[in-house]
Amino acid sequence: MRNRRVRRALAVAAALGLVSTRASAQVPEKFTNLQVLPKDVSRRELVQTMRGWASALGMRCGHCHTGGNPDTLEGVDFPSDAKWEKRAARTMFRMVRALNNDYVGKLEPRPVTAGQPVAPALRVDCVTCHRGVPRPETIDAVVTRVLAKDGIDAALKTYKDLRSQFLTSGTYDFGRRPLNALGERLLDEGRGPEALPLLELNTQNNPTAEWTLYLLGEARLAAGNRVGALQAFERSLVLSPQNPRTRKRVEELKGLLSPSAPGPFLLDAEPNHSTIGFSVPIVHGMTRVTGKFTEFSATIRFHPSDVGQCAVVASIGAASVLTGIHARDADLRGTAFFDVAQHPTIGFKSSRIEKRRDDYVAYGTLSLRGISREIELPFKPTAIEWEDGKPRLGIAAQLTLDRLDYGVGNDWKHTVIPDFLGSEITIDIFLWTKLGKPQGFRKVPPASAMKKGRVTPALRASRLRRGTYHRPGGSS
């Protein structure tokens, strides 16, 4: 009976070490200060019990014992109660012994169905709660604690790190339910900005979990992203077509996102929330120089259902080039590169727009440094939202050009390194539009009219706002 109690021993919050053969030699033959294990426990039984506790907690002997070398156990003060962990271990052992003897052991046996085997008796062990960690918490409890202390970024990192370390060990439940429960609680508390990234992560790990997708839709909706919310709700509805709550959300959002007018709509890029940047390889591609243009305008004619009626006109102030080094920026404005005195603007005007699978291509003319060439500009909408029947549109585009085709820096040479500057320029465009106005399409002043002193960036923007309108179907 005594041996049975020893085998059932548990210390849920302490570990006395994984004792190697060498370390075992340091364990004394006789023991003092035993308060939980039987006084006459054998050395072999005690070592096995300690190993079981330590393995369940994933710890070494030094977690509870003080002094000496925790790896070899040489010089360790086994009788000492100086460490809190050892004192806590005794309390936890007594608790678990009471659970096994007074509660679990006294459960009424489960009724047995005819022909089925008798279910074995239940027993609580160290690993029942700890599963290889000293603090037995659920993963959502860990994330909640870190979230409260260090914020959402630290909480996300903690979850990812633990998932990477313990995914296959069974220590934590990395299924969809824990983060769902946490995300739902945060949404109920009005903490949508914290719930959203957690549910985005949970959806990445569980892409076919219909309730996770539903909660993601609610989080996106709380963040004001109606389009993203509708996408999540629609994916959830595919997985659970009979869910009335999800179906109601889809119908509500489709009604809100449907335009009250068929279009087309005229949209202007918002410069404060848009970016036109570029990069060019140098030193034979060893690194790249990056920069951006700080003055630009773009007007988009957008039709939600007819791409044939869509068009775009854009104008960039070449003198607004910015790379972070004044001398380099001055060179770029000079005659060897953009020659802004003679060619103050870089312009693009589309002739047609076509859809390619999920993305689009704008065919049109790019005018740079007085040279005009036909190009293809691939782009994709990042989001479209409707409010009071008017669209708000986001666009991302990337374009690669050969600067030599436009005479940009053709004759420039580095004073030391030959072929220092690469010819291939990558342009990255991110546009966020203002609310649109139905009908029409403004003209941009031609590049030939934009000479220094005649058309300033402010005046160009003004002309964009005041320019001639053409009705759909007319020339633009």
Image (spheres, rainbow, N blue to C red):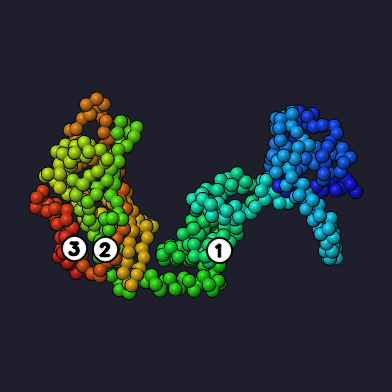
- Which percent across, then down, holds residue 142? 59, 52
Q: Disc 2 vs disc 1: Cβ atoms closer than 8 Å?
A: no
Q: Amino acid at mark 2?
A: Leu
Q: Which mark is residue 267?
A: 2
Q: Amino acid at mark 3?
A: Arg
Element type at mark 2 = strand
Pinpoint residue 227: horizontal percent, then vertical percent.
Answer: 41, 64
Counting residues from the start of the chain, the first of labels 2 and 1 encountered is 1
The answer, for residue 25, to whether it is visible in the render is: yes
Tell me where residue 365 appears, x and y as whole percent: 20, 52
Q: Residue at x 70, y 44 (%)?
A: 84
Q: In this view of the protein, which residue sits in the foreground, 47 or 85?
A: 85
Between marks 1 and 3 in the image, the one whose residue lies nearer the viewer: 1
Which of pointers 3 and 2 lies earlier in the amino acid sequence?
2
Left or right: 118 with respect to 156? right
Question: What secondary structure is marked by label 3?
Answer: helix
In three-dimensional space, the C-alpha distance between marks 2 and 1, rounded to whole angstroms, equals: 39 Å
Decide which of tag 1 and tag 3 comes sooner along the chain. 1
Task: Tell me if label 3 and label 2 are in contact, CB under 8 Å.
Answer: no
- The residue at which mark 1 appears reads as 185
In the image, what residue occupies the spot 33% across and 56% down? 395
- Give whichever of 372, 337 is nearer the camera: 337
Q: Of 1 and 464, which appears nearest the observer?
A: 1
Q: In the rendered view, would you say 4 is above or below 208? A: above
